[in-house]
Image (cartoon, helix red, strand yellow):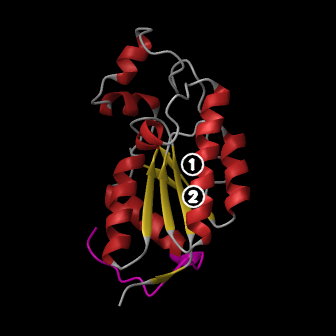
Amino acid sequence: MGASHRGVTVWFTGLSGAGKTTIRMAVEKELRSQGCKVEVLDGDIVRQNLTRGLGFSKADRDENIRRIGFVSHLLTRNGVIVLVSAISPYRDIRDEVRHKIGNFIEVYVNAPLEVCEQRDVKGLYEKARAGQIKHFTGIDDPYEPPLNAEVECQTHLHTLEECVAQVLAKLQEADYLTELQTSNV
């Protein structure tokens, strides 16, 4: 028998390379192993399918997040745990989406810019610093950290297992999960 749960959107936000997708994948694996209904909305994949054609201006980024939020809201109200990993750099649009969805947990995946640059396997930061990529969050576009995230994962200080445990604990504490069995993440 799987864990029983209510619909909720868990929104992982942070700089590129902070660890959003890594934590999201581990949380997803754990929730699926417990029999939870889970859907994933990854910012990179959404941009290829749902929001193709949007650029990286503030208006386009806001529209991208608004569309992800719309899909998240539909899934959440139908009892699905939605895991969103998207940079979502602007606080106002994250707050707008939070209010629309209602059942919402914001996870600030926090790592210093220098650490994110060291982890950058795609070389995006290097290209942004060289001027080859414009409007790159953290370099020539701002990132506005959450003021009241329900969870903050400091990936430069804590292990993946500790970060996943924080997210799962918040889901249980907020009564989105019951009967969750702990396993090795």
CB within 8 Å, label 1 to label 2: yes
Front residue of 14/100: it is 100
- Give the residues in magenta: 172-185
Is residue 168 part of the magenta span, yes or no? no
Secondary element at image label 2: helix
Residue 57 sits above or below residue 45 on the image:
above
Residue 69 sits above or below residue 183 on the image:
above
Image-quadrant location for residue 145: top right
Front residue of 42/117: it is 42
- From the image, tell me which residue sits under label 1: 68
Residue 163 left/right relative to 174? left
Front residue of 67/138: it is 67
Q: Residue at x 37, y 15 (%)?
A: 127
Residue 53 locus on image (x, y percent): 52, 28
Could you tell me if residue 150 is visible in this image? no
Image-quadrant location for residue 71: bottom right
Secondary element at image label 1: helix
Q: Residue at x 51, y 20 (%)?
A: 139
User: Counting other residues with Cα less than 10 Å from the Cα at mark 2, is it few (<14), some (14-19), or many (20 or more)?
Assistant: many
Question: Which of the numbered marks, if any, corresponds to residue 72?
Answer: 2
Identity, as a three-letter code, of the amino acid under mark 2: Ser
Image quadrant occupied by the N terminus: bottom left
Image quadrant occupied by the C terminus: bottom left
Identity, as a three-letter code, of the amino acid under mark 1: Ile
Question: Which of the numbered marks, if any, corresponds to residue 58?
Answer: none
Q: Residue at x 29, y 27 (%)?
A: 122
Q: Total of numbered circles in the picture?
A: 2
Residue 63 locus on image (x, y percent): 64, 37
Q: Residue at x 55, y 18 (%)?
A: 140
Residue 83 locus on image (x, y percent): 47, 59
SS assignment for the magenta stretch, majority: loop
